[in-house]
Amino acid sequence: GLEAVVADDAILATNTSSLSVTAIAAALRLPGRCAGLHFFNPAQVMPLVEVVSGLATDPTIADRLMATAAAWGKSPVAVRSTPGFIVNRVARPFYAEGLRLLQEGAGTPATIDALLREAGGFRMGPFELTDLIGQDVNYAVTCAVHQAFFGDPRFAPSGVQRELVEAGRLGRKSGRGFYHYGDAAVPVAETMAAAPPPRQIAVQGDLGPAAALADRLEAAGLAVIREPGAGRLLVDGVPLALTDGRCATARGVPVFDLALDYAKASRLAVAFPDQAPAPFAPTVAGLFQAAGIAVSRLDDCPGLAVMRTVAMLANEAAETWLHRVASAADIDQAMRLGTNYPLGPLAWAERIGLARVVTVLDHLAQAYGEDRYRASVALRRAGLSGRGFAHVG
């Protein structure tokens, strides 16, 4: 093997994105010199490098690789060898939640993709991104991570994606995936029809992460009354609340989705309770449209699109930190640089409010009755401490 033709002080580094560095090193005479040096594609452009230590990796070897990657102008992060390392583990919910929303008929691929881009601030939505990666490649990674974690439901593959793979609809490389490529018309997001602006808007209490929405409404020339309350809007007598992970039907009021920045978001998702959706729709649509925000109506689903995706990304990031795979700072940096997320998931959760994120996860778990949505003890603990993840390495 390679070990027989190099000096004993040579470092043996693997660029694997999923194989166990511990297992690779176990076959060596000198396992301490083996480590992972995982670049991201295209390597000449992407700054992130995961420096992966297996069980036997000599710490001085990992330190040397960190320094070498930094000297090459890269941004290295230190990772312990576990399935998916940081990026391929923490990113799984980004695809999984979109696929689940599609499977449940909450919205079309184009609508969900637009919401993740235009409200969530992601570069691409889950369907256009998996079409770019290749449905077969993305599905295979999900299956590998799911198997490596002994069938943990957090990583369960999607039957919707498996069907695409079985049909040979692999994305851009095959000409068709979730979308057609070539001469076919580009699908557009479903957008609610124009409605008149509301006559009366009241902000009742603290809107939490949606506080900037009230300022945007005022900047658009709408009169906004601010009064005490339970943290919701009252629009021409119609109550409207930021999603907390429950269905609109369970709450009995229309709900709207999370945005990365309500001052700049160009689209938001809304959902209406099954009890009486029709009378609410024009009022809610007119509110957001008056502030220059397109509105996409999703079929009532727990957590809508952006909130549930961000909550699950933060949850997996917290679990990754809890398992001592990497530091909180390195996890956030890896997700920003390796996947172009607008914020690291842990920093994003702190911006939303850790207690609020845990509440969303608890409501998702209650709605579905599945262990998939269990809140990480690390996330719950960080919220209770009031210190968050900023103080940890």
Image (spheres, helix red, strand yellow):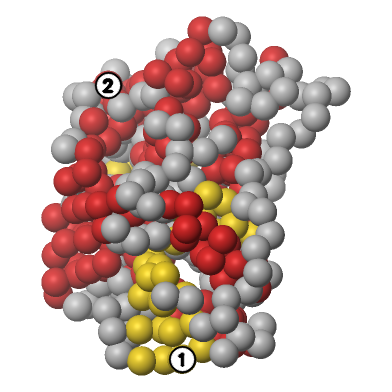
Residue 86, labelled with which disc? none
What residue do we see at 57% from left, 71% from top? 287
* Towards the viewer: 367 or 328: 367
> Tag 1: residue type?
Ile
> In the rendered image, which quarter contains the N terminus?
top left
Q: Position of residue 382 (x, y in %)?
A: 19, 68
The amino acid at mark 2 is: Gln
Specify whether residue 180 is in view.
yes
Relative height, residue 43 to residue 252 (above, below): above
- Judged left or right of residue 273, residue 216 is right
Q: Looking at the picture, does residue 357 appear above or below residue 334?
A: below
Q: Which residue is mark 2?
A: 147
Question: Which residue carries the number 1 mark?
Answer: 225
Q: Residues within 10 Å of mark 1 (few under 14, many from 20)?
A: some
Write the residue at 44% across / 80% down: 211
Horizontally, residue 233 falls left or right of residue 194, namely: left
Q: Secondary structure at mark 2?
A: helix
